């Protein structure tokens, strides 16, 4: 009996070489899997970056569109404001004219009322004078 066959713990060189070959195959397989995963990660990363770029471009286009709309609305509001101010000025001028005209009419009314009162007084006095004769 040899020492290798007598000791169950003793491993032959051939067995160690077989284990080494098995480990090398496992390592090669794991390296291939690792390389494949890295390749897929690269492809996915590229896809993610492309999607991010697309989303960013869409958002930037939308922001530009909103800014254009905002500028157009600002111009429209400014134009409306200008028109309203002009209309307000016209209304104020018309109001001033109307108030002036009203004041003049009131004055004329007062003058006419005084004239009517004076004529009534004159007529009353004249009639009283005629009646008293």
Image (cartoon, rainbow, N blue to C red):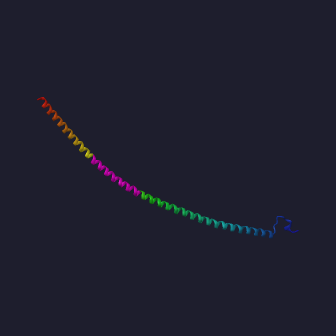
Q: Where does residue 112 sit, x and y in percent of width and height?
A: 20, 40
Who's the residue at 68% across and 66% down the image?
33
Q: Is 4 in the magenta?
A: no
The range drawn in magenta is 74-98
- Spot the residue most to the right: 1
Quarter of the image that includes the N terminus: bottom right
Identify which residue, 79 or 46, lies in the foreground. Answer: 79
Who's the residue at 74% across and 69% down the image?
25
Query: Which of the 4 image quarters holds residue 8?
Result: bottom right
Q: Where does residue 126 sit, x and y in percent of width and height?
A: 14, 33
Considering the whole magenta stretch, tell me its main secondary structure: helix
Asked whether, in this view, residue 86 is left or right of residue 10, the answer is: left
Who's the residue at 69% across and 68% down the image?
32
Total numbered labels = 0
Is 61 above or below relative to 104? below
Q: Where does residue 125 sit, x and y in percent of width and height?
A: 15, 33
- Spot the residue most to the top: 132
């Amino acid at each position: 009996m040899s020492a290798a066959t007598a000791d169950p713990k003793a491993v032959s060189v051939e067995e160690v070489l077989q284990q080494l070959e098995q480990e090398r195959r496992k390592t090669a397989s794991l390296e291939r899997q690792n390389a494949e995963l890295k390749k897929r990660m690269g492809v996915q990363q590229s896809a993610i970056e492309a999607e991010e770029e697309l989303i960013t471009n869409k958002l930037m286009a939308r922001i530009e569109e909103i800014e254009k709309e905002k500028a157009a609305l600002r111009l429209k509001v400014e134009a409306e404001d200008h028109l309203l101010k002009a209309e307000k000025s016209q209304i104020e001028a018309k109001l001033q004219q109307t108030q002036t005209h009203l004041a003049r009419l009131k004055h004329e009314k007062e003058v006419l009322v005084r004239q009517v009162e004076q004529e009534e007084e004159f007529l009353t006095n004249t009639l009283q004078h005629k009646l008293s004769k």
